[in-house]
Amino acid sequence: MGYIAPEITGKDILIGPEIDVWSFAIVLYEMAVAYKPTKVKAYQYGKGPIPFRPRDWKKLSDKGEPIMDLITRCLVMDPEQRITVEAAL
């Protein structure tokens, strides 16, 4: 479950790059800190902002701020507001 975009829940699912952007961000998060955001205590997948525990990001250059910004833009709940692949590049 941890890589699936939250909009993949109903019958009328439109598959598009927005779903891949979500999954990319989860993988990027996991690569940066060695765990998925779903492993953060008290976080419910798809129920609010992704948690960033500062202690896990402090060893990255710029304390992980550029990566966290990209991840945040990729993990917007509304797929129409999510960053595009082109903009992410």
Image: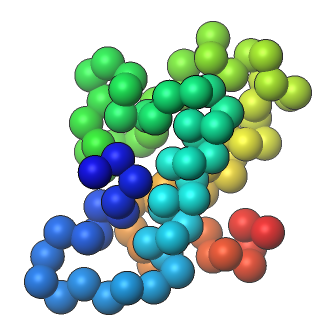
Q: Position of residue 30 (x, y in %)?
A: 56, 37
Q: Is residue 87 visible?
A: yes
Residue at x 79% of width, y 16% of height: 59
Location of residue 77 by image quarter = bottom left
Is 2 drawn above or below residue 77 in the view shown? Answer: above
Q: Is residue 72 visible?
A: no
Q: Position of residue 49 (x, y in %)?
A: 41, 41
Residue at x 62% of width, y 27% of height: 33
Location of residue 8 by image quarter = bottom left
Viewer-nearest residue: 49 or 10: 10
Residue at x 37% of width, y 85% of height: 15
On the rendered structure, is 87 left or right of 79? right
Residue at x 86% of width, y 28% of height: 62
On the rendered structure, is 30 left or right of 78? right
Viewer-nearest residue: 30 or 10: 30
Q: Which residue of the protein is positioned furthest toward the right in this rendering?
A: 61
Viewer-nearest residue: 19 or 51: 19
Q: Which residue of the protein is positioned furthest toward the top in this rendering?
A: 55
Q: Position of residue 89 (x, y in %)?
A: 79, 69
Q: Position of residue 25 (x, y in %)?
A: 57, 53
Is 21 drawn above or below residue 64 in the view shown? Answer: below
